[in-house]
Image (cartoon, grey):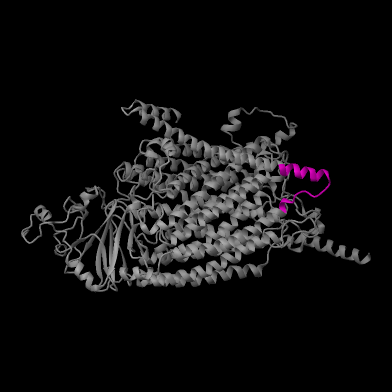
Amino acid sequence: MSTLAVHDHGVVHHEEGHEHHHKDTFISKYIFSMDHKMIAKQFLITGITMAVIAMTLSILFRIQLAYPDKAFPLLGVLLGRFAPGGRLDPNFYLALVTIHGTIMVFFVLTAGLSGTFSNLLIPLQVGARDMASPFMNMLSYWFFFTACVIMLSSFFVQKGPASGGWTVYPPLSALPKAMNGSELGMTLWLISMICFVASSLMGGINYVSTVLNMRTKGMDLWKMPLTVWSFFLTATLGVLSFPVLVAGIVLLIFDRSMGTSFYLSDIVLAGKVMPFEGGSPILFEHLFWFLGHPEVYIVIMPAMGIASEVMSVNSRKPIFGYHAMVYSLIGITVLSFIVWGHHMFVTGMNPFLGGVFMITTLIIAVPSAVKTFNWLATLWRGNIRFHPAMLFAIGMVSFFISGGLTGIFLGNAALDITLHDTYFVVAHFHLVMGSAAIFGMLAGVYHWFPKMFGRMMDEKLGYLHFWITFTCAYLVFFPMHFMGLDGVPRRYYSMTDFPAFNRWLSVNKFITLAAITAALAQVAFLYNFIHSIFWGKKTVQNPWNANTLEWTAPIEHFHGNWYGEIPTVYRWPYDYSKPGAEEDFILQTTPYSETMSSNLPSDFEDNPIGLEEHTKWATAQKSNEEVK
Amino acid sequence: MLSGTTMLMAQSADSTATAATATTAADAKTIMWMGAGYYVLLFLLLCVVIAIVGKILKVYDLTQQIQGKKELNWNNLMAIICLVFLLAGIYGAYWEFTVQGTQSLPEAASLHGVKIDEMFTVTTVITMIVFFITQILLFTFLFRYKHSSKRRAHYLPHNNTIEKVWTIIPAIVLTILVVFGFFTWQEITNTTEVKGDLNIEITGHQFAWELRYPGKDNKLGTINYQLVTGNNNLGIDYSDRNSFDDLRADTLVLPVNQSIRLNIRSQDVIHSCYMPHFRVQMNAVPGLPTFFKFTPTITTEDMRNRLNQPDFEYMLYCNKICGGAHYNMKKVIRVVSVLEYQQWIAQQKPYLTDALKKDLKLAGTTNQQKNTPQNRLALNN
């Protein structure tokens, strides 16, 4: 219904000569907007805000790790009871770690990344006026916003925010007496996550139905850009796995508030025998990781899609092995459902089950390897333009390789015995899903900024931002591998109680300094982002000479995306530097009849009439040349 | 925030302390804010410098444009930085491997640990080859194929042969790793209980580990959490005969070359029993007793000599977030010769203390020594 209405609106708009026939109030345009482009911007700006907050939290606990014995009076003033005498409280340290993880994984890299780019690009790249349900889309954002507010509000309750780690394993999270963070803070965490999952589901259902039902004429699945493929598969993954997390969380709420024993059994807390009987904490781990593992692919797949698109555009080359790229995305999507047990090798789960999960885990490395090689092949003999977006896409590939390879260690159950929950794991996932995904997101921001705001970002500041962030990310996470190999456990408030860990203190200081530098470099981005929204150079219609549909839409934004009819699509999105073509790009909307000189027989694989025409044309050309 | 500061200052002024201490408190505040302000100023200065450099570059570009000369080619500059980054990165990785790589765990001190280490070496060699090749290709391609208006990119949408090759090769390599890993894993987690295993029980609670050694019968008595009292902190069930001679210990002392079955329990939240030197880790889960079987092969004394660290100790950490003092939940492990172990175990006190006997209304409290070990649970509260 709503789809139809929006469609009509766009057409009417055109016929009335671009006149506004109904007024947008400030509220309907900027706050409760139902336009996918505005919602994308809302997601982006909220996501960036949350990222800055989570980054600040990480700097706080990095300071503790680097200077465990030093008091910082300023911290005492800023944080009050959470840092008595200028030194972080151990409970608050754990809260920082927990909230940093939660915000980064869910609020920044799931909502901030998928929410922004799925919303912006799916309708624009498949040729739709808006999402399948604009109203649900709006709700999705506001549920997300509510989740953010609730999560942050937990800093203002007396005992502080949830602090059982972002995985909130019970019984630690289920017993309010077990730690400060398991009191009200944990309740807020759970409520916030339920709002978040609601938001994710509404978004995901919208993305899936838009991609399946609202593609423009000619846009069959195999003509979709890899970005749309990755958003589509990500959304599918989210729709199928997020509900399981809700199930897990609801049972946890029951255990906390209603005296049930789903996850609890045989507990003696502080010398007091508790009445819980018959539950299993391992059940929660299964439910959590059934989402938790697909979640890391929910985080990385949109980044892969964005990197593929950006690298193809800026290498002026078609993405290498488009079909292989799609199949490997599908492979990752399917396999990601059956690997969750590799988070639980040492929980006491049946060792045979551990062996099975190890096999599925290492299988998932194959499609990941294929993707990496295809990206390298895309660069090979390209004509590479280094826009900041391109640099960030390259950074994403580099991080994905570095972090992905250590996954082969951790996916191996035998090696995981020593590496589990050490800094090796921290290094692994911060590179492969943290840095790689955030670089994918930044690549997207630099690349589609003109589409979002109609202005360009400053390239030089982008270069500065990239090189400092890229270098510092490696400086932060590379040494952590070696700490992990020395058996340094993660989530330790300080290492000073262990003489064996003293030798890592200088490394910890180094990491903290690198992290602070990286954090300061984000000022360059924030300045660039905000300044360019208002005062950046005005963009042209197609600033990167890209093929995809969004660059055929007018620069100015209005609900409906295109004046008049939605353009028809004739070809795949990666016809860059096609031999015989006038320019080094051919828009998806250009029919083959206009590009006779560059058509190839392989363009007509499923089109016998076209192939006939092409052969006719080719023979005519040949005879013409002979005459000459 | 500011009002908070003034309040704090006001408090210190109001307090009975002399004027001198009040001034020092105020001074400390001033120093603190000045310190913070100093860094903020420094950062602002840096921003100004960057802005000036940016402007200079812009002016330079403009003058070059006016004079009809070539502008600064940022694209080439980025390509060069990519190459510089690659070289610096390779050197950095080499430095890390040679300097920090030597700081990783010493050789495995257990039988199965040696196999894990072999597996680790094989995986490291394979992955590092891939790491260096792919990263070098990535950054050299960037440099080699930087933009030039004189040429066009090579139109290469796909090549089925090469795609098959790089699907199949990783698949084969991973199959090898999987098979190797699967059998190692099966061997380590082999659950068959062999007669002659030394059963030791370790129980985690916030924030300490409790040890229980079997007595002469070499059997641990059963445990029932509902029996936990002040004097019976583990909830040992004394209706089981095997419980009577179970011993309490402070240090995890292990006889060398003896197969050990470490029975792992938790009383409150999930802990993890992590002994990196032995390549042992298993979670302690309330309601789900777990275990890990291993054989220590190097005594503490021997390891001290090998590492040339006279104060070296094997350690057991908690490796699953378990609350505020998670970072300090440790136990010393000492691997000794069989003879030393027998001497040591003979000196350990049973869990069945006089006080507990009184609680349980058991007879025959006379044989017990007077200085019964203090109740550890009470200590930990």
Q: In the picture, which quadrant includes the N terminus of chain B?
A: top left
**Which of A54/A177 is in front?**
A54
Task: Tell me if residue A601 is in the magenta stretch.
Answer: no
Res. B230 in view: yes
**Which of A183/A55 is in front?**
A55
**Whole-percent x, y for residue B153 in the image:** 74, 59
Residue A626 located left or right of residue A607? right
Q: Quadrant of residue B219?
A: bottom left
Q: Main secondary structure of the magenta part?
A: helix
**Which of B160/A9 is in front?**
B160
Q: Residue at x 68, y 57 (%)?
A: B80
Res. A36 in view: no
Residue A163 located left or right of residue A11? left
Residue interval drawn in magenta: B56-75
**Whole-percent x, y for residue A453 in the image:** 66, 38
**Whole-percent x, y for residue B78 in the image:** 68, 53
